[in-house]
Image (tube, grey):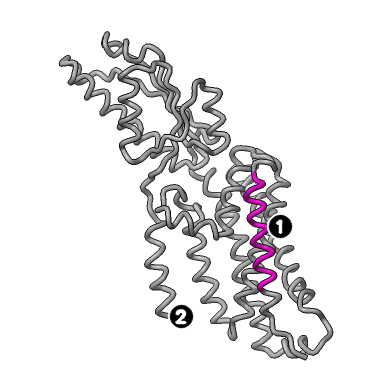
């Protein structure tokens, strides 16, 4: 445990802890459909930072891709784009950016701005005109859901999830093993209490504590940072309830395998570090290698981080978070069934 666990963390975590943004989903509205607009789109896509996920005919249609998380950024190219270039007149392009993840939004807009500026200079050189100091393309960014680009709006909801994870995971991991160490588990084992009742009794206190902690955290977020969910706050509690069931179950699984509290704590912390860094809490999941993105599917923390940010910043409704809710309920059933089966009750 002392050597193997840190080695595994060192091999996995650097792939996730990157601040470079790649695979940014791009939607395009090409109102010009000329040679220059096609060249600009090709240059953006070939940069390696963006992937073209939508090609819409109108802004309203493209905006739906941001609302449905199918695009992180929309590039709108105006009509007469090529004509203005030929006449050496300024032309505007508009960027609409999903700013729920402020870091990703800022870097994505900056990447695209640099690509457009380079494209601007290349076209001017091709025309042989001495306009090196004139930028014919003016870029107008519009940040949705986090217009101030305030990083606290992005991080505070995620930190609330971290607190609930520590309550549900670490403390519950030490619960049963503490009974083993002090000897009270033997007294419980000779009682007629069924195993599922015993596990349920271990779940309930941490669920209550977690929901109380969530309430305190929401109050502090409102009082100190001025943050309050744009959506229904009851959805946060609903998801937190099933999340606590799932993560407390995972902690109880660790507890049933461990013989000492030290062993349980070490194992729980090992998984916590991986869960935190592979959750999208600090860096977007889409920027990680594909095999790491596949691993994050099995991380319950990822789903709660996504959901709480959607509710806080986008005002998402129950129908918008059903896939994540279904996944977390599945985790809850899996981990708690595992804990019940693995708990050895003798009498």
Q: Which residues are magenta?
A: 321-338
Residue at the spot 70% in from the left edge and 90% down from the top edge: 183
The answer to whether 316 appears left or right of 202 in the picture is left
Judge by depth and name the residue closer to the eye, 156 or 168.
168
- In the picture, the disc for residue 241 is 1
- The residue under label 2 is 1
Examine the rendered structure and indicate whether residue 47 appears above or below residue 294. above
- Residue farthest to the right? 192
Main SS class of the magenta portion in the image = helix
Which image quarter: residue 46?
A: top left
N-term-proximal mark, 2 vs 1: 2
Residue at the spot 52% in from the left edge and 66% down from the top edge: 272
Q: Residues within 10 Å of mark 2 (few under 14, many from 20)?
A: few
Q: Residues within 10 Å of mark 1 (few under 14, many from 20)?
A: some
Kindly state the secondary structure of the residue where label 2 is placed: loop
- In the picture, the disc for residue 202 is none
How far separated are the C-alphas under marks 2 and 1?
32 Å
Residue 81 inside the magenta-drawn segment: no
């Amino acid at each position: 445990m002392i050597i193997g666990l840190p080695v595994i963390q060192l091999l996995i975590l650097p792939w996730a802890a990157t601040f470079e943004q790649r695979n940014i989903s791009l939607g395009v509205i090409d109102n010009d459909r000329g040679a220059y607009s096609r060249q600009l789109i090709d240059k953006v896509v070939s940069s390696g930072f963006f992937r073209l996920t939508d090609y819409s005919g109108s802004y309203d249609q493209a905006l739906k891709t941001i609302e449905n998380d199918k695009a992180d950024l929309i590039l709108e190219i105006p009509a007469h784009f090529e004509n203005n270039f030929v006449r050496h007149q300024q032309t505007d392009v508009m960027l609409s950016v999903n700013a729920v993840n402020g870091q990703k939004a800022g870097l994505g807009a900056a990447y695209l701005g640099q690509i457009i500026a380079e494209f601007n200079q290349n076209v001017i050189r091709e025309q042989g005109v001495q306009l090196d100091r004139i930028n014919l393309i003016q870029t107008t960014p519009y940040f949705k859901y986090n217009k101030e680009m305030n990083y606290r709006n992005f991080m505070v909801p995620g930190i609330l999830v971290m607190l609930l994870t520590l309550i549900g995971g670490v403390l519950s991991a030490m619960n049963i093993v503490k009974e083993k160490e002090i000897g009270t588990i033997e007294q419980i084992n000779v009682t007629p209490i069924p195993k599922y009742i015993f596990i349920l009794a271990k779940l309930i206190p941490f669920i209550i504590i977690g929901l109380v902690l969530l309430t305190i955290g929401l109050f502090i977020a409102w009082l100190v940072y001025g943050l309050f969910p744009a959506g229904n706050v009851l959805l946060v509690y609903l998801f937190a309830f099933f999340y606590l069931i799932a993560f407390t179950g995972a902690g109880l699984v660790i507890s049933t395998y461990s013989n000492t509290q030290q062993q349980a704590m070490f194992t729980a912390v090992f998984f916590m570090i991986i869960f935190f860094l592979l959750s999208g809490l600090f860096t977007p999941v889409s920027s990680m290698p594909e095999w790491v993105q596949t691993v994050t599917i099995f991380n319950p923390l990822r789903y709660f981080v996504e959901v709480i940010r959607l509710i806080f910043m986008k005002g998402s409704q129950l129908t918008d978070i059903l896939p994540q809710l279904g996944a977390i309920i599945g985790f809850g059933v899996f981990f708690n069934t595992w804990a019940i089966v693995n708990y050895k009750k003798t009498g």
